[in-house]
Amino acid sequence: LRSVHIARVDARSIVVHDPEADDTPMACVDLPPSKELVESRETGFTVLQSAIDDGFASASASATVERSLSEGTTIGLRVFGLAPATTYPAYVRYSDCAVAEGGERYRIDRDVMEPRESNELWLPVSTGGDGSGMAELTVTEHITRADARSIVVHDPGDEQRRYLCIDLAP
């Protein structure tokens, strides 16, 4: 049997159920641990109105996401065309950039509502003299779920203002 579905990186086994006996499990096979990455690519970005208003209309960004069973999640962020020698707050978000400019912050434990670095994915990015910068975050104890959809880079003086949104999903 073949499926067009791509299994999540945390899929551990396949169970065959008996349709004649109330779906009682009949057989189980463990899937081998995989180091293969579910995602590892650069994605699209959007320059948001606050950045345009502040003179950064030509800014750009890219992100990579790598997920593996053995190494957790690594997220990379690159920005270009922002103010030099500045640190910009950036957070992984629940929505694509086209939906509410990335929506709410992604939380590892969805039941914890208050912002907490230990429960969110923060990627503050510092720019050099040319206005470009990189940040990388590796979280070994958590594999991001499919609802980690974007990264939003904020105005360093006012985190309510969003400058760039980078989609993490295709």
Image (cartoon, helix red, strand yellow):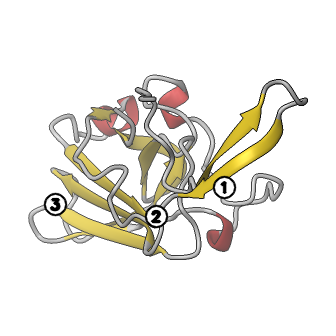
Work out whether residue 91 or residue 3 is closer to the camera in this orientation and state it.
3
At x 75%, y 44%, the residue is 26
- Going by the numbered disc 3, the residue's amino acid type is Gly
* Disc 3 target residue: 131
At x 67%, y 66%, the residue is 119
* Disc 1 target residue: 107
Quarter-of-image position of residue 129: bottom left
The relative height of residue 96 versus residue 35 in the rendered view (above or below) is above
Q: Secondary structure at mark 2?
A: loop
Q: Secondary structure at mark 3?
A: loop
Q: Nearer the viewer, mark 2 or mark 1?
A: 2
Q: Quadrant of the N terminus?
A: top left
Which callout, 2 or 1, points at the residue further toward the start of the chain? Answer: 2
Q: How many numbered discs sit on the rendered protein? A: 3
Is 133 placed left or right of 150 in the picture?
Answer: left
The relative height of residue 45 versus residue 85 in the rendered view (above or below) is above
Q: Position of residue 130 (x, y in %)?
A: 9, 63
Q: Position of residue 161 (x, y in %)?
A: 49, 43
* Disc 2 target residue: 32
